Image: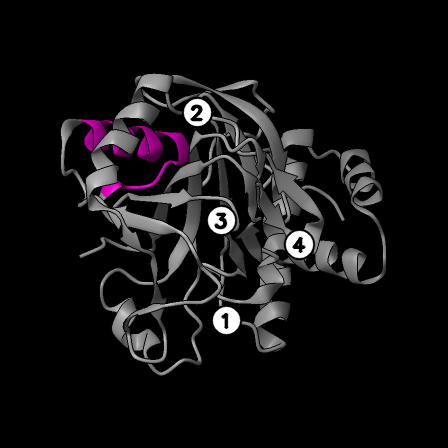
Amino acid sequence: MSTTDARQQVTPELRQWIVEQAEAGHGADSVLKAMLASGWKEDVAVEAMETVLRGHLEVQAVQQGLPPAVPVPDAPLDESPLFVDAGDRRVCVLQAMVNPRVVVFGGLLSDQECDQLIALAKPRLARSLTVATRTGGEEVNADRTSNGMFFQRGENELVRRIEQRIAKLVNWPEENGEGLQVLHYTPGTEYKPHYDYFDPVEPGTPTILKRGGQRVATIIMYLAEPDKGGGTVFPDVHMEVGPRRGNAVFFSYERPHPATRTLHGGSPVLAGEKWIATKWLRERRFE
């Protein structure tokens, strides 16, 4: 293997070599070391490896019967920043996981914004429904025992401001978001572990997808803290996020499949009240 010209183009031969090294069991460090020894610049070598291996893994996944991956929202975390620019607010990065992509943000909402959302939501609360993938409609689900309501996208100045902030934070168009949902949990209520994407095998899913494609990410914002319980759990990776007021947990899923390891749930509230606001992001404009 050698560089082909001063611009160090990633050739088909280089792509094949990287794939062969991976299939032979050579780690990323040894492959990178070999590329550097052959004269490749480190930034070019790292980018080539990531791009080629990502494509190779995607081909393997599809060959194994998984749905194709799609682009998903994400925050700019490549350089491990402590803060991310969300437009009108600087948001802390408290924790980040790559696989699954889970990020815990600190201070996404102010105390005043949390209080305002709760006050606006209270008069409109009703038993929470879930999307019925068997029919394309909505239904009461015994796994979800909260009360909730939806704001229309851009319904008021507060909602617009939060939606703009989220769009900036995770680099995703505002119009691709569903309406902001506010949920209220009291002692004994919960949302058992589930996936947020729409199961492709369910008969109602094609109808649901007409409104904006698949869900590709979720952001859960904590508006009020229970005294005990109520954390957001990710059973596949043994992770729990505490419902700290003003903070949020974001996670994305590039394909509608359990391989994304985005199984999650809201643990039962044991004491006090839990309030959250949830925003689901779609592939395309949500109608």
For numbered disc 4, what is the local secondary structure?
helix
Q: Percent from the top left, x then y, of residue 118?
A: 30, 32
Q: Quadrant of residue 165?
A: top left
Question: Disc 1 vs disc 3: which is toward the camera?
Answer: 3
Three-letter code, disc 4: Pro
The answer to whether residue 263 is seen in the rendering is yes
Q: CA distance from mark 4 to mark 1?
A: 22 Å
Q: Main secondary structure of the magenta part?
A: helix
Mark 3 vs 4, N-terminal side? 4
Q: CA distance from mark 3 to mark 2?
A: 20 Å
Question: Disc 3 vs disc 4: which is toward the camera?
Answer: 4
Identify the residue at image location x=41%, y=36%.
170
Three-letter code, disc 3: Ser
Q: Which residues are magenta?
A: 158-174
Identify the residue at image location x=20%, y=45%.
124
Q: Quadrant of residue 91?
A: top left
Above or below residue 63? Residue 21 is: above
Query: Mark 3: few, some, or many residues within 10 Å (few <14, many ≥20)?
Result: many
Q: Is residue 209 left or right of residue 154?
A: right
